[in-house]
Image (spheres, grey):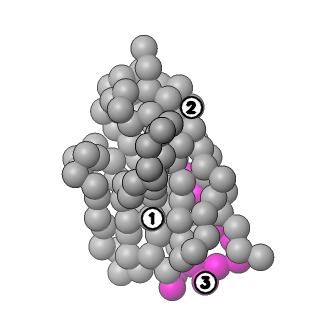
Amino acid sequence: QKQLVESGGGLVQPGGSLRLSCAASGFDFNSYPVDWYRQAPGKQREAVASMSTSGARGYADFVKGRFTISRDSTLNLVYLQMNSLKSEDSAVYYCNIDTFWGQGTLVTVSS
């Protein structure tokens, strides 16, 4: 059974950092690109970062230079390191592989 489980969200002050994790199970992990999306209240879900099977990374303009996506193919984990967080980064963050989504983890950036 394919499953994605995100963790690592929470409340952080502006300028702070968080690292999100996504545990993937049931996948041939090395065969899929991985993506992070986010959805703020009242807004559409938007792509944040992606990483191909070859390790190529892509980022939305609004997170470039602040967020880093990585993957551990040994442990079937996907990470999103988020630095210099802003209030507008507050959202539920989702991991995506193929057509599967996790339940999301809430990130709140507030003083």
Residue 38 percent coordinates (x, y): 46, 49
Residue 19 percent coordinates (x, y): 48, 43
Q: Amino acid at mark 2?
A: Gly
Q: Which residue is mark 1?
A: 35
Residue in view at x 35 percent, y 32 percent: 88
Within 10 Å of disc 3 (Cα), the crowding (few <14, some 14-19, many 20+) is few
Q: In the rendered view, does 31 fall on the left or right side of 28?
A: left
How much space separates mark 3 and mark 2, taking CA atoms?
30 Å
Q: Earlier in the sequence, mark 2 or mark 1?
A: 2
Dots 3 and 2: beta carbons under 8 Å?
no
Residue farthest front in this picture = 42
How much space separates mark 3 and mark 1, taking CA atoms?
15 Å
Q: Foreground residue, 72 or 8?
A: 8
Residue in view at x 38 percent, y 65 percent: 50
Q: Is residue 3 above or below residue 36?
A: below
Residue 67 visible in rendering: yes
**Quarter residue 35 falls in:** bottom left
Q: Earlier in the sequence, mark 3 or mark 1?
A: 3
Residue 23 visible in rendering: no
Q: Foreground residue, 58 or 23?
A: 58
Q: Which residues are magenta?
A: 20-31
Q: Which residue is mark 3?
A: 28
Q: Which residue is mark 2?
A: 10
How much space separates mark 2 and mark 1, taking CA atoms?
20 Å
Q: Is residue 64 above or below residue 23?
A: above
Q: Amino acid at mark 3?
A: Asp
**Quarter residue 99 falls in:** bottom right
Dots 3 and 1: beta carbons under 8 Å?
no
Q: Does the magenta segment cover residue 21?
A: yes
